[in-house]
Amino acid sequence: MAIAARWPSGFNAAMDLPVPAISYPSHAAPPSPVTVLRPAFPAAPLVFASAHSGRDYAEAFVAASRLDALRLRRSEDSFVDELFAEIPALGMPLVCATFPRAFCDANREPWELDPAMFADALPAWVNTSSPRVGAGLGTIARVVASGESIYRGKLHFAEAEARIHGCWEPFHVALATEIEAAHARFGSCVLIDCHSMPASSLPPRSQVDIVLGDAHGTACAPEVTLAVEEVLIAQGFTVRRNDPYAGGFITRHYGRPHDAIHAIQVEINRTLYMDEARVERLAGFETLRHRLTRAAAALAARIGALALR
Ligand SMILES: [Zn+2]
């Protein structure tokens, strides 16, 4: 299946601070909004996704924002794509958004928009009343994670359309393609939707490393959730289920256990690997990456043996 790569003009890549920035002039061919890293030999019916670790910021987007780049970056699930970088070598695909979550949120319905953000009227079919829109965190977010407003002024609906057609849709086309391919090959598929959570989202001193969200058992068979939980506990992680994150759009949309497609959201505590204020990796980054890689390898073996149908 062809994956569309229409992209709003003026993208400027790589605001990942330790790496030299690569500048894409507005007239140059834009980078792809999604990266799909496929294994040479598919080995297990799992697909991994990272919707919120993109860090290619459009110059025009940063210019239209009242926030500086660092404050925009705090809305990312930073470096989650890097934490799972070994997944393809284990025989499973990894689908990553390259666009920032503050620019377009792929873990929302395609058209969850706040009419107060727009200078023109929104079409009647747009979902303007979801709790996410009310919180300022629709498909085009009004605020960053800190609650600060992103934009200096109002947007036009055409801008939202360009982002959704140029970012949201290609990400989901790519993700759906990998899920369908795994399902066709193995007869089942488990989607591991990878995110990270700010320490402030957890009660003080709760010491939770990872929150698993299976939409309270509706997106994933119990034996799959248990397998994910046990391979993480075996690597020494403290794991909690569905609290405070039960799973977003991706988990709920793709998780159809009765069709042998299971989805589970994995939220990693950012204090395990990054300085949240500075958006920098901590010394424990590589150790965490290895622990997650070992858990994924163990999960691949276990899911293969479950013979899900
Ligand atoms: Zn996320």
Image: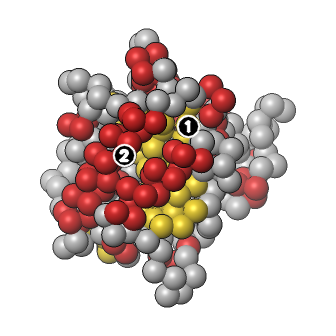
Bin the neighbour count of mark 1 within 10 Å (Cα to Cα): few under 14, some 14-19, many 20 and up.
Answer: many
Nearest the eye: 264 or 248: 264
Q: Is residue 151 above or below residue 282?
A: above
Quarter of the image that includes the C terminus: top right
Going by the numbered disc 1, the residue's amino acid type is His
Q: Which residue is mark 1?
A: 262
Label 1 vs label 2, nearer the camera = 2
Going by the numbered disc 2, the residue's amino acid type is Leu
- Residue at image location 58% in from the left, 55% down from the top: 213
Bin the neighbour count of mark 2 within 10 Å (Cα to Cα): few under 14, some 14-19, many 20 and up.
Answer: many
Q: Position of residue 116 (x, y in %)?
A: 75, 53
Q: Position of residue 304 (x, y in %)?
A: 38, 34
Q: How much space separates mark 1 and mark 2, taking CA atoms? A: 14 Å
- Which disc, if any, is residue 299? 2
Q: Is residue 87 above or below residue 291?
A: above
Nearest the eye: 279 or 229: 229
